[in-house]
Image: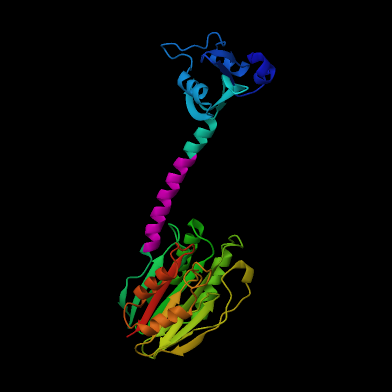
């Protein structure tokens, strides 16, 4: 009866191991592949106390009883197999069970290797995260200004970076940058930017357009893939002259200056730092700063946040919050973002607040 249901020649031609058990749950057929591997014919394929031959009859028995198709893994003769147990019907009656054993030893090996590599990568990324966080400045007072910030990567590592540092007795430098993409490569660019600012001459640091030009030349000389680039806004606050001199390499949105409950963006021309724009130049602009003024630097991860209706958070909300609150502005921004959208941000989210004291 079984021979009328199964083409034995086809089964013998299959590279996977195949065996058939009858309605009494006894092995009645094994194909050539299984016979060669196990060194046993169907007649010999019985359960033995020493477990020499694989014979897990409980699965086939269940399929015979319920008609279920059952998928499982088995370890046989130092190999891993994915086993599919399926019923064979004669009209509405289950007359036999066919089990197909596919060797997945190589897949299991590759899976273990991938898991181990991922663990190594996670470890390396977590260590890189510690380094990245260690580059951030301390919150509080520095050079006649008060600094506060939000730094929230969308992944373990961020493509955003900023820093606030004293250039000399009278001047305070601040930059914010945003690298395309996320992950390890982007985080390495943020460290490059931080390193460059730490190693520029005082003359370059006091002239934002010159600083960006030198960073651009050095970055392009590395000859990275043309798709890797970053934006950067850099400014210098002179507390003796009460001025803020700034230049922009394609960073959007531009910083928001708030004064006497009025806010506006410090807009100036400039393209991102990229091998695509090797001939671009940067310009300096200057604005006066007064006690009580606020400068908010953000990356696009905040204004591009969307709510359930698909609306952008935008820049105006940020300016409004700065105007309404004289303390804990970033705390209020964070709460407003949470109420605007319940979703986790897909982009890095960075905001830096400089308050002139």
Q: In this image, 247 relative to 171: left or right?
A: right
Where residue 14 appears, x then y in whole percent?
65, 23
Q: Is residue 270 visible?
A: yes
Q: Main secondary structure of the magenta part?
A: helix
Give the residue displayed 49% in from the left and 22% down from the top: 65
Residue span colored magenta: 114-133
Q: Residue at x 50, y 66 (%)?
A: 308
Q: Is residue 278 magenta?
A: no
**In this figure, what is the number of numbered marks?**
0
- The reply to whether the magenta stretch includes residue 132 is yes
Where in the figure is residue 22, as x and y percent of width and height? 56, 15
Residue 167 appears in view:
no
Q: Is residue 70 above or below residue 4?
A: below
181 to 27, vertically: above or below? below
How far from the left and from the top, in percent, is residue 351?
42, 73
- On the image, which quarter does residue 283 sit in? bottom right
- In the rendered image, the quadrant that contains the N terminus is top right
The answer to which of 148 and 104 lies nearer the viewer is 104
Q: Residue at x 44, y 11 (%)?
A: 48
Question: Viewed as shown, does residue 338 lie left or right of 40?
Answer: left
Q: Position of residue 183 (x, y in %)?
A: 49, 57
**Residue furthest toward the front?**
92
Screen quadrant of the C terminus? bottom left
Q: Which color mode does the image show?
A: rainbow
Camera-side residue of 76 and 168: 76
């Amino acid at each position: 009866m079984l021979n009328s249901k199964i083409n034995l020649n086809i089964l013998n031609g299959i590279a996977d191991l195949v065996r058939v058990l009858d309605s009494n749950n006894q092995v009645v057929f094994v194909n050539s592949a299984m016979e060669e591997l196990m060194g046993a014919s169907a007649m010999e394929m019985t359960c033995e106390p020493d477990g020499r031959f694989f014979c897990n009859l409980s699965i086939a028995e269940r399929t015979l009883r319920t008609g279920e198709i059952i998928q499982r893994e088995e370890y046989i003769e130092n190999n891993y197999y994915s086993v599919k147990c399926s019923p064979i019907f004669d009209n509405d009656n289950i007359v036999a069970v066919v089990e197909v054993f596919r060797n997945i030893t190589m897949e299991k090996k590759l899976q273990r290797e991938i898991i181990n590599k991922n663990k190594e990568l996670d470890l390396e990324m977590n260590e890189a995260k510690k380094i990245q966080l260690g580059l951030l400045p301390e919150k509080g007072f520095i050079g006649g200004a008060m600094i506060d910030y939000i730094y929230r990567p969308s992944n373990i590592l961020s493509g955003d970076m900023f820093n606030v540092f004293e250039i000399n007795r009278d001047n305070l430098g601040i930059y914010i940058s945003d690298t395309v993409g996320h992950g390890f490569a982007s985080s390495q660019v943020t460290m490059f930017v931080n390193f460059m600012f730490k190693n520029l001459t005082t003359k370059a640091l006091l002239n934002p357009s010159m600083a960006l030009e030198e960073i651009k030349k050095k970055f392009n000389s590395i000859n990275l893939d043309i798709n890797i680039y970053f934006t950067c806004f850099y400014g210098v606050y002179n507390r003796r002259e009460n001025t803020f001199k700034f230049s922009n390499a394609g960073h959007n949105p531009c910083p928001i200056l708030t004064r006497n409950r009025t806010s506006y963006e410090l807009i100036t021309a400039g393209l991102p730092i990229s091998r695509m724009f090797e001939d671009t130049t940067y310009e300096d602009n200057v604005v006066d700063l007064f006690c009580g003024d606020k400068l908010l630097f953000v990356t696009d991860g905040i204004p591009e946040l969307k709510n359930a209706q698909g609306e952008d958070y935008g820049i105006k909300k940020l300016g409004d919050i700065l105007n309404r609150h004289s303390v804990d502005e970033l705390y209020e921004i964070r709460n407003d973002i949470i109420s605007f959208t319940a979703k986790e941000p897909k982009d890095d989210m960075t905001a830096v607040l400089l308050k002139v004291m």
